[in-house]
Image (spheres, rainbow, N blue to C red):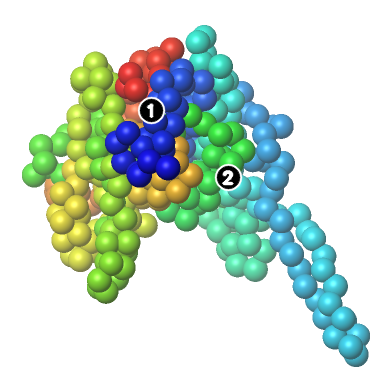
């Protein structure tokens, strides 16, 4: 067998794959507010038959019975839903799968503790639903992002993943609110493991799928993306973001990249700026203030990207 690398069997298989037309795109989005303009633009319908909905997580309950310690297993339907799936088609694209990770109904997600969030007020949910009290919260962050990406790849076998969402950016990098970035690289900034090799694993740096034509044609900004599980930024995280040379900061990208890499699906990252992290305003306030307007910019960019991809193969991107 030829060795790995250029000219190897593996490389030739990848080359062949890259020459096939893209027929299925998976868009992973964390928040309902970010997803709805895209769902509406593509006139997607909620896919109630999706395996991602039907295959709710199973919970195995083990109970010991009797003097001999006989074990009985009971399979229960878990009370939480992994994702909402949306489905639609576009001429030339056989199937576009839109997946958003929203609505872990927290009153159901974990029967032991999460009911405490059931009737709390969220300004974000207020924006989405038009009412203040709600039964769940958008499952932002790396854990749910990796879960749904894994489940969706297994179920849908997409040719390409687009992780779309909002992000913070930096005025020292010349960013402004509503700028849309296509990330060239992604890495984590909150996984500090100061042991040789584990340190690199923690940072988890990965290149996104290279799309030079897309970048040129759509005039998107290019920059590196850094991911962590917090909206704010500690001094240590700031140092890691600088070390990652990141221009944009989000809460999902590197987790999606990790799973995409694991399962060998090319992934790109489109991030629209809601807040300037090194600016004057508190991040949460600025984020909420700009969220609705910036999701419109995100929708436009995703629409342009999907239109550009339509009819092309990976090697043409
Ligand atoms: N999403 C939007 N703004 C963000 C920020 N400042 N950090 C992480 N994720 C974000």
Crowd around label 1: few <14 · some 14–19 · many ≥20 (10 Å): some
Seen as rendered, the residue at the extreme top is 91
Give residue 78's position: percent from left, percent from top. Answer: 71, 56
Q: Is residue 162 visible?
A: no
Residue 200: quarter of image: bottom left
Of residue 248 and residue 306, the one placed in the foreground of this image is 306
Could you tell me residue 168's position as x and y percent? 25, 44
Disc number for residue 226: none
Q: Residue at x 25, y 20 (%)?
A: 213
Could you say whether the residue bearing mark 1 is in a helix, strand or loop? helix
Closest to the observer: 74 or 46?
Answer: 74
Label 2 residue SS: helix
Q: Quadrant of residue 243?
A: bottom left
Pinpoint residue 48: horizontal percent, then vertical percent.
Answer: 69, 32
Q: Is residue 188 above or below residue 291?
A: below
Residue 73 % position (x, y): 82, 68
Judging by the rendered image, the residue that carries numbered circle 2 is 151
Compared with 35, 204 (above or below) is: below
Question: Which quarter of the rendering shows the N terminus?
Answer: top left
């Amino acid at each position: 067998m030829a060795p790995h690398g250029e000219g190897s069997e593996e490389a030739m298989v990848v080359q062949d794959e890259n020459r096939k037309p893209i027929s299925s795109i998976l868009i992973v989005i964390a928040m309902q507010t970010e997803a709805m303009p895209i769902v509406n633009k593509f006139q997607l319908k909620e896919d109630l038959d999706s395996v991602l909905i039907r295959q709710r997580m199973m919970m195995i309950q083990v109970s010991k019975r009797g003097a001999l310690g006989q074990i009985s297993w009971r399979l229960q339907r878990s009370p939480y839903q992994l994702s909402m799936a949306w489905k639609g088609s576009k001429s030339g694209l056989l199937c576009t799968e839109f997946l958003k990770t929203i609505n872990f109904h927290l009153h159901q997600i974990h029967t032991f503790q999460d009911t405490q969030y059931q009737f709390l007020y969220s300004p974000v949910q207020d924006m989405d639903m038009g009412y203040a009290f709600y039964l769940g919260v958008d499952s932002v962050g790396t854990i749910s992002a990796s879960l749904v990406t894994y489940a969706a790849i297994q179920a849908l076998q997409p040719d390409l993943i687009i992780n779309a969402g909002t992000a913070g950016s930096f005025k020292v990098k010349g960013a402004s609110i509503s700028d849309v970035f296509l990330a060239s690289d992604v890495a984590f900034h909150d996984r500090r493991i100061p042991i040789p090799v584990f340190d690199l694993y923690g940072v988890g740096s990965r290149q996104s799928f290279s799309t030079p034509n897309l970048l040129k044609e759509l005039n998107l900004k290019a920059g590196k993306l850094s991911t962590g599980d917090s909206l704010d930024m500690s001094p240590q995280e700031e140092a890691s973001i600088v070390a990652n040379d990141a221009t944009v900061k989000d809460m999902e990208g590197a987790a999606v990249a990790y799973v995409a890499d694991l399962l060998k699906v090319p992934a790109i990252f489109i991030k629209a700026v809601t807040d300037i992290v090194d600016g004057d305003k508190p991040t949460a306030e600025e984020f909420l203030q700009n969220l609705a307007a910036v999701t419109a910019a995100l929708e436009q960019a995703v629409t342009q990207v999907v239109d550009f991809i339509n009819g092309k193969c990976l090697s043409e991107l």
